[in-house]
Image (cartoon, helix red, strand yellow):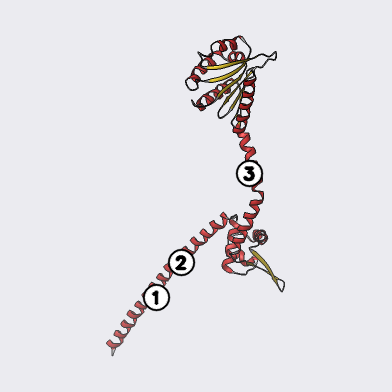
Amino acid sequence: MYWYIIFLIHEIKFCWHNIWEYWYFSFYVLQLFCQYFWQKYIMNIKRLWNHLQKLGFSEKEAEVYLTLLSIGESSVLQISKSCSVKRATIYNILDILEKKGIVRLQVDWGKSTFIAESPKYLESLIEQQKKELSEFLPELEKLQQWSSSSQAIKFYRGKEAMYLAYDKLHASLKPSDDYLVFGDIASWFDTDRDFFSKWLEKRKKVIRSWRSIFTDSQMAQKFLQNQWNLETRVKIIHSKKNFHAIKLITSKQVFLHKTWLPHLVITIEDSAVVALYKQMFEVLWESL
């Protein structure tokens, strides 16, 4: 009898120990499953959060909207307990979401609750945004045109800036480009004889054939006499007015250089302006 009782106690301990291990193992497995699904849920929420922000929601607006979708009809207090947004802020966010039409206020027996509209409403919201965009898109395009026009005009002030402008002009030239010159060649050379003598030599290596209309001066007459050696055609305009400037017209830009101090160069890279200046040059060329 004594040994039987000892054996029975031993079996009970063994079974209890196995039962405890079984429940411990079951709890551990359940915990892993919960952790896995919770992580998937959090990742899914974050993905939806990012998508809503791409649609124009702020971080807090997206969080409040997703919370309301998850927990259903709720009061502000319930929403604040289910997300990280402060209760005072939630009132403002709900007001914004209500104006967007994706959250609805419901008052029943003096109790205010909020309900998230069907997510399908977001499609109509996007369509509405597209419609609004199409209404003012032409105005945006006009602004871009003004901006691109202002960017096409560049100013170079000072002697170093003048050198830079001519270096850029030379770098942009191609053998097939038009090259038309109008202005006072004498005052142009007097600006910096050494620099412009070298610049002309560099330009000849790219543009060998060009046309010029110069105001009358000894240097202009010299160019006229040597025009065939210089592979250029020159015409002289006789005027009592002093024109201390040079204008270069290429296929891509109009290059205006004021030859009296302070130094100033203006470049205009606009196809319509270039075409206009070319027409003006051709009219003057044919009249001489």
- Which of these two is toward me, 245 or 114? 245
Q: Quadrant of the C terminus?
A: top right
Q: Secondary structure at mark 2?
A: helix
At 40% across and 73% down in the image, what residue appears? 26
Residue 225 shown left or right of residue 243 in the figure = left
For image coordinates 42% across by 67% down, the residue present is: 32
Q: Which one is closest to the eye, mark 2 or mark 3?
A: 3
Q: Identity of the amino acid at label 2?
A: Phe
Res 243 quadrant in image: top right
Query: Which numbered disc flags the more N-terminal residue, 2 or 1?
Result: 1
Q: Quadrant of the N terminus?
A: bottom left
Amino acid type at image mark 3: Glu
> Mark 2 — residue?
37
Q: Quadrant of residue 52?
A: bottom right
Does dot 1 land on a helix, a strand or a loop? helix
**Structural distance between the alpha carbons of marks 2 and 1:** 21 Å
Query: Which residue does the numbered mark 3 point to in the structure image?
Result: 141
Q: Amino acid type of disc 1?
A: Trp
Q: Position of residue 36 (x, y in %)?
A: 44, 65
Residue neighbourhood size for the residue with mark 3, other residues' Cα within 10 Å, grouped as few (<14), some (14–19), many (≥20) = few
Q: Which residue is mark 1?
A: 23
Marks 3/1: CA–CA distance: 69 Å
